[in-house]
Amino acid sequence: MKVLLTGADGFVGGWLIRALLADGHSVVGTRRSPDLISPVLTPEEAGALEWRPLDLRSTDSVNSAVRGAWDAVVHLAAVSSGTEARRDPGLAWEVNAAGTARLVEAMLPGSARLLLVSTGEVYGHGSGAPHGEGDPVVPCSPYAASKAASELAALEASRRSALGVVIARPFPHTGPGQDGRFVLPALAARIKTARRIGAPAIATGNLEPVRDVLDVRDVAAAYLALLKSGRAGEVYNIASGTGHRLADLLRRMQELLGSRVVAEYDAALARRSDILHLVGDASRLRATGWMPRIPLDRTLQELLDAQTD
């Protein structure tokens, strides 16, 4: 397939580029500026791709980036940090929701497949059970709300065209290359720094929330499976189905590192309206043959190894 990948300069984009190329696909990537490459890719790997600039706030930029004949478009580009979205909700809506509306309009009247990457956070707080795709969409953050709106924009366009839209709702995922805006690499960096300088404690936010944590490479494999077998108009959770308290994940990273620190709560690091239980049921995706294959301990170890001492 000839695939256009938006957000190819990001953390997940880099891993997905590797997965697509290894599977024999031709990839054109978009990035926000000419000097940006995914932290996952080497300069040589990045140099092997055709790159196009993309600013989702600009109709002209979107039209230029999308121009061409594609078998599939994978839409990863977004304001992906919940903290950044809360800081500027208008920007999150402009990029995630309006930007997706511009993208799908630029794809019309073509019949390419669009894999729209949303988030499991659109389900909101829930009841404590794993979320299924039939659960109500009740987002409780600017990030999740803007991603839910992006789903509506894509599905609306599909109803008046031949555009085949598949929606992926990934639950939290991590791995080497993810930056410190996200909780697990931030915790990994803090405990490694504490060990290096001999500090007895680290500052943390609320560690009681439960998260369904996947390795980013399993998520990239899920996107490949959906490009091949996902049904147009369907929503697919990407999840392990198992929840872990953040406190338990921190403790496990310390065990893997062979170091102990005290977690001291810092209100400045806590998220307002944090979802206390975010776990997904991926039975629909598993029916395509996908399943997570990378053990959590390997993910956490490689996340620790990726942090600077």
Image (cartoon, helix red, strand yellow):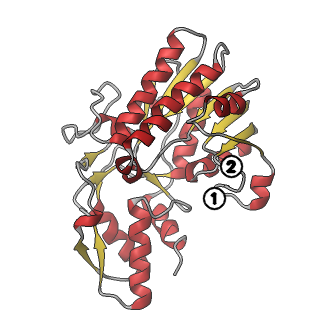
Q: Name the residue under label 2.
A: 18
* Farthest-out residue, bottom: 198
Residue 83 x, y percent position in the rendering: 37, 53
Residue 27 x, y percent position in the rendering: 73, 39
Q: Which of 267 and 119 is in front in this view?
A: 267
Q: Can residue 230 be seen in this view?
A: no
Query: Which residue does the image show at 60% across and 34% down from the upper left?
Result: 58
Q: 10 Å neighbourhood of mark 1: few (<14), some, or many (≥20)?
A: many
What mark, if any, has residue 137 been given in the picture?
A: none
Q: In this view, does 1 lie above or below 144?
A: above
What mark, if any, has residue 40 been given in the picture?
A: 1
Mark 2 to mark 1: distance in Å? 9 Å
Would you say 8 lies left or right of 77 here? right
Query: Which residue does the image show at 46% across and 57% down from the upper left?
Result: 295
Query: Which residue does the image show at 56% across and 37% down from the upper left?
Result: 223
Q: Is residue 187 above or below residue 4?
A: below
Would you say 108 lies left or right of 270 here? right
Q: 10 Å neighbourhood of mark 2: few (<14), some, or many (≥20)?
A: some
